[in-house]
Amino acid sequence: MPIEANLIGRLKDELGDNPVVSNVVLAFLLAGVEKMLEVEFTCPCDPEWSTWSVVPFFVIPAVTASLLMLLIHGVSKKKTNNKNTHENNKEKESKIKNKIQNIIKNIVKIFLFSGLPLIVWMALMLLNGDYYVCGYSDWPGRFVTADKSSLKWCEPTNTTSYPSGELLTHSYKLYIWSQWYGNVMVGVLLFFLIVYIICKTMSKCCKKNNKEEAVAAMPLQDRKQDKAQQTCECSV
């Protein structure tokens, strides 16, 4: 039991502190939900209802996932100690810089935890293609699978007013455009992932440099005491 509790606690900490890990887990969950919806989805193939029947599939799961992630993680608030009133200019500038970095960090966190799930879901829906084809099918018909293809489209019931050959070609084009838009969204996700990794690396470098500057600015006696304290902590 203690081992299982430690594993669960560690998993919660990892998901809470690392937006990339939590978004990857959520992406797999959303992919599973999308596959279940794909099995149950049937387009009404009605000019008045086709678009409106697709909108909830795009909006509701995306907004739900975004709000859920935002409620779980929230925004971090760091308390500042204002007891020391005698501060030099460097310390004041450092505090202002830290506040600005904290604000930027919170904005990035809000986007990562609420914006990325929305983009992930939209990408999954567009890569599927069926929902986009259904939404733009403005002719009456029945939702069937095209011959020798995985495309699902609205086959017209009245072939006199709506030529099936032209509409099938139009549906193929919609399917291709849908997947293209989905790939663009995947590219956007990849771009933000690269930016996040770069920012994370730069943040670690800045913290390391600030720590080295703080140690260098310390008096020799305090530096020895700090080093001795770290040695004691490591030995413990």
Image (cartoon, grey):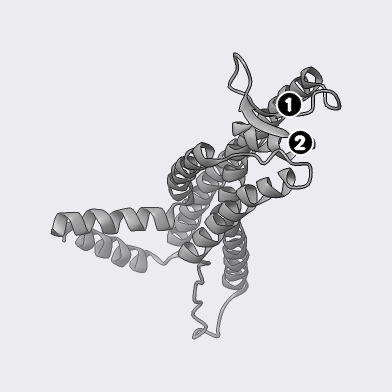
Q: Would residue 22 be found to the left or right of residue 194 on screen?
A: left
Q: Residue at x 41, y 58 (%)?
A: 16
**Residue 224 screen position, x and y as percent:** 31, 63
Task: Please state which amino acid type lies under the numbered disc 1.
Answer: Ser
Residue 172, picture quadrant: top right
Q: How many marks?
A: 2
Label 1 belongs to which residue? 171
Q: Earlier in the sequence, mark 2 or mark 1?
A: 2
Tell me what residue is drawn at x 58 percent, y 52 percent: 62
Q: Nearer the viewer, mark 2 or mark 1?
A: 2
Task: Please tell me how crowded label 1 is: few (under 14), some (14-19), or many (20+) other residues with Cα within 10 Å.
Answer: many
Asked whether, in this view, residue 219 is left or right of residue 231, the answer is right
The kind of residue tagged 2 is Pro
| Residue reaching furthest to the top | 148
CA separation in Å, label 2 and label 1: 14 Å
Instruction: Indicate whether 183 appears above or below 58.
Output: above
Residue 203, compared with residue 93, is above or below; it is above
Quadrant in which the N terminus appears: bottom left
Q: Position of residue 139 (x, y in %)?
A: 79, 35
Q: Which residue is mark 2?
A: 140
In the image: residue 161, left or right of residue 193:
right
Residue 68 location (% of width, % of height) = 50, 61
- Of helix, strand and loop, which one carries label 2? loop
- Which disc, if any, is residue 2? none
Quarter of the figure with residue 234: bottom left
Residue at the image point whose x is 59% and y is 13% from the top: 148
Query: Which residue is at the front of the view, 167 or 221?
Result: 167
Name the side, left or right, on which 37 lies relative to 234.
Answer: right
